[in-house]
Amino acid sequence: MLKTESRPGSPATAGRRQPRLAGVWRHFDFLLAGAAVCIGFIGCLMIYTATRDQLQVAGISPTYYAKKQAIFMLIGIAVMLGVAAIDYRRFGDWALAIYGFCLLMLMAVLVVGHKSRGSQAWFQLGGYQFEPSELAKIGLIIALASYCAAARGRLSGRALVALLGLSAVPFALIYKQPDLGSALVLAAVLVAVLLVGGVRGRHMAALGLLAVVLSFGVVHFGILKTYQKDRLTSFADAPNQPNPAMLATVAGANEYNVAESKTAVSNGGITGQGFGKGTQTNLSYVPEQRTDFIFTALGEQFGLVGSAVLLALFAVVVWRTWRAATLARDQFGTLVCVGVLAMIAFQVFENIGMTIGIMPVAGIPLPLMSYGGSSVLATFAGLGLVLSVRMRRFS
């Protein structure tokens, strides 16, 4: 059953007076929220520079994508504040309903979702798209945190199997879309929550061995599609300089994408070529630059210095999220923060690593930087949960 050990309105808290909302806002983490907003602002600027020339050639306003991203940002900030205003323990009470709703959305998108480039991963809502896989990340964090908290830090083998089952269903539905990147994010969240949630060492070792065996089977027995295997291995074979002849095959195209990405980042040097002056960016040489490869726009235009500033902002987000986890008054709050931390940190590491050629191309967005409203809203919702935990650490 998905529930925590202590909730407002439950027998454990029935005699305790809930704090006034105005009082908890005194503990709002402006540093965490401010760092997130700054990252989003940088993302809007990079999306503008990465898309303006293409849009002008097509006769469309050069700010088209940047404006849409800015709208996503404003809505996301409102979502973050709205979630922060709700006692995070209420989400534990609603864990089963939230989890069930996420599964319904994942199943619905496989039936009536919009299909493009071989994937059926989002709903088309007018000029906007909604990806339920992003919502599922938050739903799984809440479900896992609630279940682990109910176990009070003592996860038996049976509880571990239940947690694996909770994760396996959304993982399979997302993989079916297919969206391997988002599925990997769910796996990272599961591992982080298990490590902090009280899983026994021998169970974790067995789980690690099982993961290795399953990974071997997936790769060698045709479960992964050829293009997926090519994407996961392209970083190891990509040359330092792109060659248009590489585009003749799917594997070559993946290697070409990584090579173009590495060229753009290396062009930035220490201080970059300047805002709006990146050669690779202006000539649209980097594929999918506004989404998966948005970091290349920053690296080329602002170099190592600009990249370091962005990484420092992400470090602030990670630090303050971990700080909220350590200050949480209950295990549910701690695990929610750990899940959000794992979601953001894994995506940052994988995306930037992919961009500079040290990680596989998994199609994972850079949080608050990559173009896409669903990712922005999910990230801000997760940060809203973290803020709620920190704001109520004394209540």
Image (tube, rainbow, N blue to C red):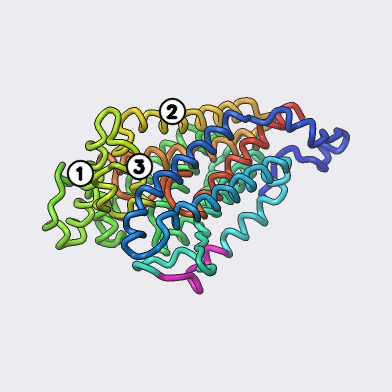
Q: Amino acid at mark 2?
A: Ala
Q: Is residue 71 left or right of residue 390?
A: left
Mark closest to the chain's N terminus, 2 or 3: 3
* Residue on which the image places disc 2: 312
Mark closest to the chain's N terminus, 1 or 3: 1
- Bounds of the magenta span? 105-115
Is 48 inside the magenta-drawn segment?
Answer: no
Pick whichever, 143 or 388, lies toward us.
388
Tell me where residue 304 appears, x and y as whole percent. 31, 30
The residue drawn where x is 52% and y is 27% is 319
In the drawing, what numbered circle is on residue 295? 3
| Residue 162 visible in the picture | no
Pick whichever, 38 or 277, lies toward us.
277
For the residues labelled 1 and 2, the Cα–Cα distance comes to 27 Å
| Residue 364 visible in the picture | yes
Q: Is residue 69 left or right of residue 144?
A: left
Q: Is residue 131 above or below residue 49?
A: below
Q: Amino acid at mark 3?
A: Phe
Pick whichever, 337 or 214, lies toward us.
337
